[in-house]
Amino acid sequence: MERALDNLIDEVKRLILIMGGSVEMALQEVTQAIATRNASKLKNIHQIEQKINEDHIKIDETCLTILAKQSPVAKDLRLILSVLKINTDLERMGDQVMNITYTTGDYLTRPPLAQVSMITQMGDFVRKMVKESLDCFVKGDADHSRQILLMDDEVDDLKNKVFRELCEHMKKNPQDVDASLDLILIARNLERLGDHATNIAEDVIFAFTGEDVRHGGKSGA
């Protein structure tokens, strides 16, 4: 017999996927804007971020309804608690993409730098992390979520490479300081997006296994 709770859980999963898709789309748009130097793409991101905020509220309200009226226990409760955390991470990811959008607007007014190729590489990689972490959530795939945790190290390595190369570039080309600082800020925001995708992967592991892997810890339920 189908439970009312199952229908509500399916609904929050659907909303999470829609919200995650919006984050992916916004990240793709800003990455393409940087790569192609097409500032018109930045206008779309403001609308996407507004949709992310609306979905954030819907998901919170649906989860609170479940907690108040369905009194979930055990794995259902873990899932709802994880959804609330994932929802927060996705909303913050929308904020990070907006930070990148504003900085990209500044960067596109300056002469282009060759190091931008590393920025677009970071953007594509982070978008892959977001997609795969949400796929794991839908499939209940805790095993692949553990692989996503390792991917975050690659994002950190790329960010460090960007920082090193741009610091060296600024020393030799002081006229490019502003553009270099723009790309450094974008790389920092992309790294934070990777951190949020990692948080989602950790929440998937907790939701479906009861294991808390944050800070290297383990606990079963």
Image: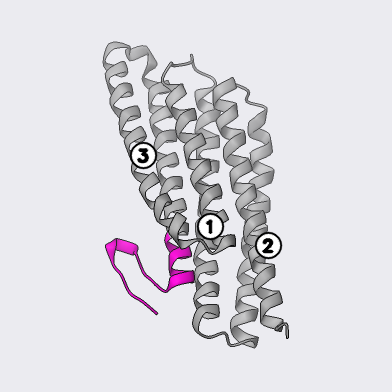
Q: Residue at x 45, y 23 (%)?
A: 116
The label on residue 10 is: none
Circle 3 residue:
154
> Looking at the figure, which quarter contains the N terminus?
bottom right
Q: Residue at x 60, y 78 (%)?
A: 64
- Displayed quadrant of residue 108: top right
Circle 1 residue:
136
> Looking at the figure, which quarter contains the C terminus?
bottom left
Nearer the observer: mark 1 or 2; the answer is: 1
Q: CA distance from mark 1 to mark 3?
A: 19 Å
Please state if 29 lies on the left or on the right of 112 as rendered.
right
Residue 91 visible in the picture:
no
Q: Residue at x 54, y 26 (%)?
A: 34
Above or below 42: residue 203: below
The label on residue 14 is: 2
Q: Earlier in the sequence, mark 1 or mark 2?
A: 2
Please state if 5 lies on the left or on the right of 163 as rendered.
right
User: Could you say which is closer to the camera, residue 207 or residue 159?
Assistant: 207
Q: Amino acid at mark 3?
A: Glu
Secondary structure at badge 2 equals helix
Q: Amino acid at mark 1?
A: Cys
Q: CA distance from mark 2 to mark 3?
A: 30 Å
Secondary structure at badge 1 equals helix
What's the image's color scheme?
one colour
Q: Which residues are magenta?
A: 202-221
